[in-house]
Each structure stands twice: as structure tokens, then as C-alpha cells.
Image (cartoon, rainbow, N blue to C red):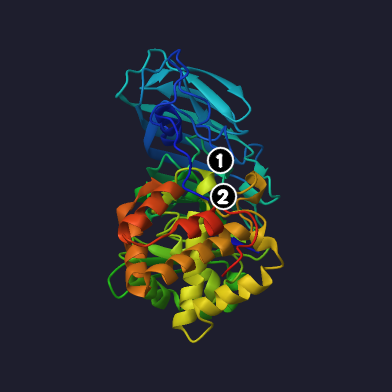
Amino acid sequence: MSRSAPLLPMVTACALALVLTACGGTGDGRGSAGVGDPYFPQAGNGGYDVSHYALNLEYAPETPTPLTGTATITARAGQNLSAFDLDLKGMQVKSLTVQGRKARWTRRGQELTVRPSAALAEGETFRTTVRYSGTPGTITDPDGSQEGWLPTADGALALGEPTGSMAWFPGNDHPSDKATYDITVTVPKGLRAVSNGELRTETTTGAGRTTSTWRTTQPMATYLATVAIGHYDITRTTLSNGLPVYVAVDPHEAAASSKVLARLPEIMEWEEYNFGPYPFSSTGAIVDRRGDAGYALETQNRPFFPGAPDTATLVHELAHQWYGDSVTPKTWRDMWLNEGFATYAEWLWSEDHDGDTAQQTFDALYRSGGDADVWAFPPAEPTSAAHISDSPVYERGAMVLHKIRRTVGDARFYDILQGWAAAHRHGNADTADFTAYVERMAPGKDFSGIWKDWLYGDGKPAHP
């Protein structure tokens, strides 16, 4: 996303299991409601692991039920389950089946509690189909930003970070549970629907309605799923290595976007050189009309931009494809592993393209402190959910990476950047995983001061 101490204490095996969502039962055969995330404790659900979402959506904005959906969720039970929860906020559930049999359900807040007609055995793979409809809502985050289903000037936009996906489809809405996706969207005449992954089919009915089917075959966290509906100019090309590129731009932003978007192949080549092989099967961008959303977001395969992006923002959001989308945080406490890396990518781009060096950027931040906001809290320990996207997570997170670079030297530092992306490709990791990885990659180097003063320390470190 782009905005307009010692190691973590040891946790018990049960607490870790809650984070990973593979277990997390209540002791009575029900999966837990929430995985115990430190900032969003009700996000996600315990007792199962999702492997695939098949979403079939119909958007009809002029009707009493603008969105009608069918979600088929394939998951594996991590325990014996007599009941389990899905995250779904708003929307009316019309019917629900598990393994093709009608199931009972109840609603409370964002929790859709499902009670199958027969208990599910530990290790069993099962399918849950939810048919639902209604007016999907916009969710206001603790920091005041908006996500979920956002009406736009000519359509709608679905953005999920951190908890917005539950506004438009039921699921296990936590970054620790990643899955593959098929997303089919039917929209009114003249509109397009753009999503993640690759466009498989696009057909138009006699009434002019268009149905598009998108497939994502690499694992994706729910918060990275998107649907953008509106009028778009579409460009389909390939990079020199054959990677497909799909770019959708609102016509109002086409002229202002063209120069920066023309650099996407150059940026992708530079990022692959520095960060290692690109982790996904296509790339691109979605540029909507300015004002339709308040931030850019690293939606998987093709980042979203609210208006024409500048080069630094394009570098930032594409860098997230490695750091955030492929290597995804285990909990929202670990956001600096997304934003610190993507911010440092901006510093490295500047350094390699005749701008300020990373050292100059570091020094300027240390002197000014970004109006002192950079020192408000340690990057690895945001003070609350309202602050997981604040300056310490971005700029001070990048400063931690620069301190590591100064300690190990450039050759080993780039080994760390690429190795980290490779070691956790399509997986999840937390801060303790990262600090342990750095120490393994640079034996004999002392990182204790960096962890204590820069990653976990309060206030401005005494020495840069």
C-alpha cells in the first residue's frame, strides 16, 4: 500500500497454530471465530485451511440488490468440525450447503457460523457453497481509510486491506490463509470487470452484459483480491521474457498515466534483477479515476492506483508483489515486512537512477524524522490497528533494512533480499522469521543493536 528490541518472545504451540489457522478449535468441535490477530482479533477463523475460492458475481447497480454472488470455498479441516465460521459483513445469505447438503447457519457481526448436516473429520477436504445478495458495504478502518466495496463514478471497486474482502465475499479473511481463485463477474452493458490473475474468458450476451472470468493459480491472501468495474482502456502486451501484462486505465486518466505506465517493463526488469524471479504468472496495473479511493494498493498481479501513479509509487506497489503478496505477513503486526521493503525499493530505484542514494535518504530522514512521526513507535510494534500504516512502518522499516545493508555490505544484502523472497515464496512469515534469516545469512555479524534500537526500540536511536 502507498499512503496519500530483542526478537519477539516465544509463543506457545497453540498460539502459533491459531495464527496459522490450521487448528484453533474451541474444544467442542467448532473452529474458532477469529485467529487472534493482535490488531484484528476477529479476522480469520480457526479449524480449517482454504485452498480455493470460486466466486461468481453479478453486478446490477440499478436494482435493489446491486450484488448477487455465489461463493464455493474448498477447504481442509484441521480438526473434527461440527461447526465453523466464515467472515462476511452485511449481505443477505440466501442458501448454504456443505458437501452438497443443506447446512444451518447463524449470523453475528462479521461471523457467519456454519453447522454442517454431518460433522467434518480432521483432514477432510470439503466444499462450502454460499449464495448471497444485497448491497455490499464500505468498511472504515481504524485509521479512517475506506475499503470493502467502494462505489465509483462509473462502477465499483473492491479493495481488501486489511479486512475489506468480507464486504463482498465470505471467506477466511486473514493473511495467514492464502488460496487460489476463480472470479467470474457479470456487469452491465459497456462496463468491464478487471480482477487478479489472468483473464480466461470474456463473453457478451444479447442484452450487452459482459461476463469475465479471471483465474489466480498462485496463492493469494484475501486482502489482495480485487474487482474493478467501470470503463477502462485495456492494453495487453508481454515483457521481453514472455510474461503477460494486462493494464486497465480509466479513460479520464489515460493521458496522465501513459508516460509512467510505459516504464512498467523497465521497472519489472529492474525489480527481478534486484529481488529475484517474479513470483506470479502475469503483471500489470489498474488505474481508476482520481478520488475513487484514497490510496494505492498492491492487489496481486496488477496493483491498483487512484489516479495516474508517479514512478516511485509504481516501483513501490510492484515491489510488493515480492514483499507482501508472495511473502505475506503471518499477522498484521508484521506490516513493516511489506511496507519497509517496498519503501526501500523506492530508495534503491532512486539510487540506481541518478537520484538520492539510499544513504542520503536515510540521513535526511534521521535528521528530520519526517516531522518526528518516524519515531512515534517501533516498526515491528505498531501501537494499535489505527497505526499499522503509519510512517514508522514505512520509513523506519526501510531504515532497518538500510542498517542491515551497512552491516553486511551490498553483495550479502542483495543475497538477503533475494533469498528472503525465495525462502518464503507464496508463504507467510513474521518478524522473528526475518531476523533469524538475516542472522543465518550473515554469521559473525552483530545485529543486536539494530533489533534493539531500530526495529523494537522506542524513540529516535542515539546514533544513525
Q: Amino acid at mark 2?
A: Ala
Q: Is residue 454 left or right of residue 179?
A: right
* Dot 1: element: loop
Which numbered circle lies on residue 108? none
Q: Which residue is mark 2?
A: 158
Residue 395 picture location, percent across and down: 58, 64
Query: In terms of depth relative to the viewer, which is nearer, 350 or 258?
Result: 350
The quarter of the picture where residue 305 lies is bottom right
Q: Which residue is mark 1?
A: 168
Number of numbered labels in the structure image: 2
Query: In terms of depth relative to the viewer, which is nearer, 7 or 161?
Result: 7
Residue 21 picture location, percent across and down: 42, 32
Q: Is residue 75 left or right of residue 353?
A: left
Label 2: how many residues lie within 10 Å, few (<14), some (14-19) or many (20+)? many
Rendered residue at 47%/35% (across/down): 172
* Dot 2: element: strand
CA–CA distance in space, label 2 to label 1 = 8 Å
Residue 222 picture location, percent across and down: 47, 44
Q: Is residue 153 visible?
A: no
Q: Is residue 148 visible?
A: yes
